[in-house]
Amino acid sequence: MALTTRAAALVLLGILPVVLWPDAGLALPWLALVLVLLVVDVALAASPKAMALTREGADQVRLGESTTTSVVALNTGRRTARGLFRDGWPPSAGTSPSRQALSVPPGERRRLTTTLTPTRRGDRHADRVTLRLLGPLRLAGRQRSVEVPGRVRVLHPFPSRKHLPSRLAVLRELDGRAAVRTRGQGTEFDSLRDYVDGDDVRSIDWRATARRRNLVVRTWQPEQHRRIVIVVDTGRTSAGRVGDTPRLDAAMDSALLLTALAGHAHDRVHVVAGDRRVRVRVSGSDRAALLHDVISTLAPVDAQLVEADWSVLAAEVARSTHRSLVVLLTPLEPAAVEEGLMPVLPALVAHHRVVVASVSDPAIDAMRADRDGSRAVWGAAAAERTMARRAATAEALGRLGVDVIDAPPDQLPVRLADHYLALKRQGLL
């Protein structure tokens, strides 16, 4: 049995005479009357078991946007169901309204819609739908919580997608749709032309020369359909926050922009996310399906408070013997890099072109520049030491043949995309 504020007010109304004329004989009859009214009200209330509930609505929404989910209530009983309805979602789902009035005549159905504005990325699951059906006096009623399964996957907002059109224009230029190819670069055969002074004699096509009776050389273009492997570190260092955003979310944003760009270039993209074990594997060459799959699959992935096992992640990269561009999205934390990542890099660099992309914290630059007061000076010294260690780590990675990109969250996706385009322009993929 569920009581309402009306029942409490009715009980308090009977206490007033007792306060004015202290006599227990005045209160007992009133309380008995209230109890009888409550029992009658509950008996006349519709049964929650007679309500058939089904859920409808979207199953995906981008973080920062809103969606709706609906529960259809069918009254299979003989009494009108009146009362309150509550759709149970976790607080991070951002439900509105939290409660709704319900009135369903016998044999009819009503759609109860809840708006969701999630505040966190990942899967949000509905808990229980609670029905509180009241009697005609609205003093008391029957309450029941029913499991009506529901899930909304909150996708990464992908803020760097605004940079995609400008990078696609550069990519079209590299593909030869808006500019002339650079002669002699790449490894994929393009065409034949007459020999001119300065051409590499190793490019001479002797069969074509014999047919034409003058020297003919082959021209080349950058190889298409290359393999791009993007590894997202979900270990403890990715759980740190830069401003209000976890490092992992900034790394995902970079992975999504590079995936979209490489997909348009018809490169085969393979995305891996993991720490001590591989948690996500996504691959494909269809750019539209690939980007959707990567966004959807990465959405529920969270950073784990464990050290990343780079031998496991490197083994995932090594599953293919083809030379690839391997992008490792991991924080440039000296201890974690030196102990976990560096031992596996020589084997990776021997077979692939490796890029380490890291999210830097602008707050450290602000600390380094602030020298106002003794406390700020100590903070600036700590920031200088942190930056020096990161620079030394980046230099050590460079000596191994690794390209290092260290940038703030809003700049890292663009820097990584530009680096990919520069490698394509130079025919180094």
Image (tube, rainbow, N blue to C red):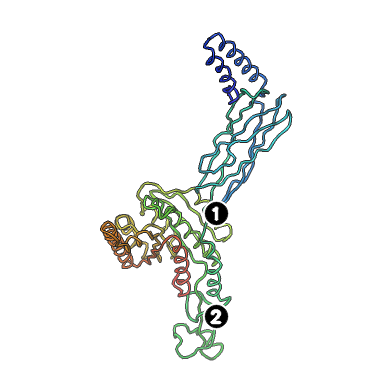
- Which residue is outermost to the top? 25
Quadrant the N terminus occupies: top right
- Residue 278 on image: x %, y %: 43, 50
| Residue, far front | 20
Residue type beneath disc 1: Asp
| Image point (34%, 68%), residue name | 401
Neighbourhood count class around disc 2 (C-alpha, 10 Å): few under 14, some 14–19, many 20 upward: few
Q: Position of residue 252 (x, y in %)?
A: 47, 56
Amino acid type at image mark 2: Val
Q: Quadrant of residue 251?
A: bottom left
Residue drawn 49% across the image and 63% down it = 258
The span from disc 2 to disc 1 (Cα, nearest Å) is: 34 Å
Query: Which disc, if any, is residue 205?
Result: none
Answer with mark 2 or mark 1, whichever residue precedes in sequence: 2
Question: Vertically, is 14 above or below 248?
Answer: above
In terms of secondary structure, where does tag 1 sit?
helix
In the picture, the disc for residue 293 is 1
Q: Which residue is mark 2?
A: 180
Q: Nearer the viewer, residue 149 or 64?
A: 64
Q: Nearer the viewer, residue 102 or 107?
A: 102
Q: Position of residue 275 (x, y in %)?
A: 39, 50
